[in-house]
Amino acid sequence: MLIALLVCLIPTTIGGLLSAIGIAGMDRLIRKNVLAMSGRAVEAAGDVDTLLLDKTGTITLGNRQAVEFLPVPGVTEKELADTAQLASLSDETPEGRSIVVLAKQYGFRDRHLTHEEAAFIPFTASTRMSGIDWQGQRIRKGAADAVIAWVKEQHGTVPPELDALVKHVSGAGGTPLVVARNDRILGVIYLKDIVKGGIRERFDQLRAMGIRTVMITGDNPLTAAFIAREAGVDDFLAQATPETKLELIRNEQKQGKLVAMAGDGTNDAPALAQADVGVAMNTGTMAAKEAGNMVDLDSNPTKLIEIVEIGKQLLMTRGSLTTFSIANDVAKYFAIIPAIFVATYPQLQALNVMRLHSPHSAILSAIIFNALIIVVLIPLALRGVRYRPIGAAALLRSNLLVYGLGGIIAPFIGLKVIDLLLVALYLAD
């Protein structure tokens, strides 16, 4: 009798459902075209406190276009357009192509220079510039501080009007690219980007969940502040480099926070490896994919928000079913133990509220109920509890009212019904 009692009172419900909850979380990620390297990564996504998001393509539409050439005094728009187009000949990004197209409005045709005719200078995260060396001219375009430093190295001077042009573009939420030729700054290219519709509402939901959002961008602080304010993120990191990204993640982790971020380049690899949830883009470098613990096959950085939501749903499902399981087990103890020992200990009669037929039927009812309740709950474990962006306190109240109360009521009803059926079918003494 004692062994039978221990078997029927073992908390089997949550033990049988944990694996189903974990498998379902992995499956939901796969359906989103995200491969997780481990189940731990999915769980960590649900506990994320800080979310690092790249600005371009995630918060903004990512198709920044050149809309205006702003020359400094003494330089014509046509001269600036000519130089900007030369600097962009090898730039295959949407921004670079738009500069070439905008220059055509000033009468310049497409130029086709070969590597034998000119030396093309690619953009790098360290220089934050690109350009061309051609016919004795050294032309650069890029971030204002980087180009200014380069011009000073050529023993050139910076026009006092440049700062006002840069602030004008940055203050309007655009990205200023400064253009220089040899030791002379010619002006600014105005790149315009647009914040995605509905992104502010997504950040509001994350904030309600207690997640702090940080925008990562190579833009200057003025532009970054404007976009961050318009998008509704909590903070931003401007003029980001691989070192500053890594430092930001480490500082957050020192405060006991879990950090998630997305990246695709070799420069992102150290930060992806350091982050608790590192999502590498499938189109990214091998170094990035090896450093992260998830790979997004669609290469969509926005999906980082959905990954966090899936992780939250997994943890919510586990919490809800754990609450039900604990309440279910406690209720079973109060239902079965008095029925078994009431004959030996008459003082337990007051607790024998269910009036089960006999100790034999009580144990048999518990074993059958355990088997049935797991089968009933498996679909819920696989489907997951409906995700809602609410705080921890509200979630706890909801779990206690729905799954806690349900876990108490279900055994009393289920055990009594099974007991009556066993007696009616003469399957219990």
Image (cartoon, rainbow, N blue to C red):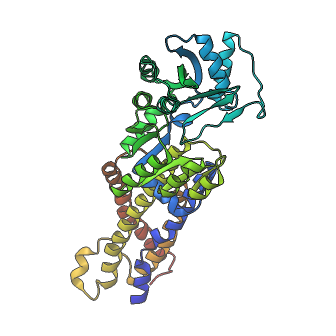
Tell me, yes or no, if residue 188 can be seen here: no
* Residue pictured at 60% horizontal, 53% vertical: 288
In the depicted structure, whether residue 270 falls above or below residue 362: above
* Residue pictured at 23% horizontal, 84% vertical: 346
Tell me, yes or no, if residue 22 can be seen here: yes
Closer to the camera in the image, 373 or 321: 321
* Residue pictured at 51% horizontal, 51% vertical: 310
**Residue 56, quarter of the rendered image:** top right
| Residue 241 horizontal/vertical position (percent) | 49, 44
- Taking 396 as reference, is 85 left or right? right
In the depicted structure, whether residue 425 falls above or below residue 129: below
Q: Residue furthest front?
A: 155
| Residue 137 horizontal/vertical position (percent) | 65, 25
* Residue pictured at 47% horizontal, 71% vertical: 15
Closer to the camera in the image, 131 or 54: 131
- Taking 416 as reference, is 187 left or right? right
Closer to the camera in the image, 92 or 196: 92
| Residue 44 horizontal/vertical position (percent) | 46, 58
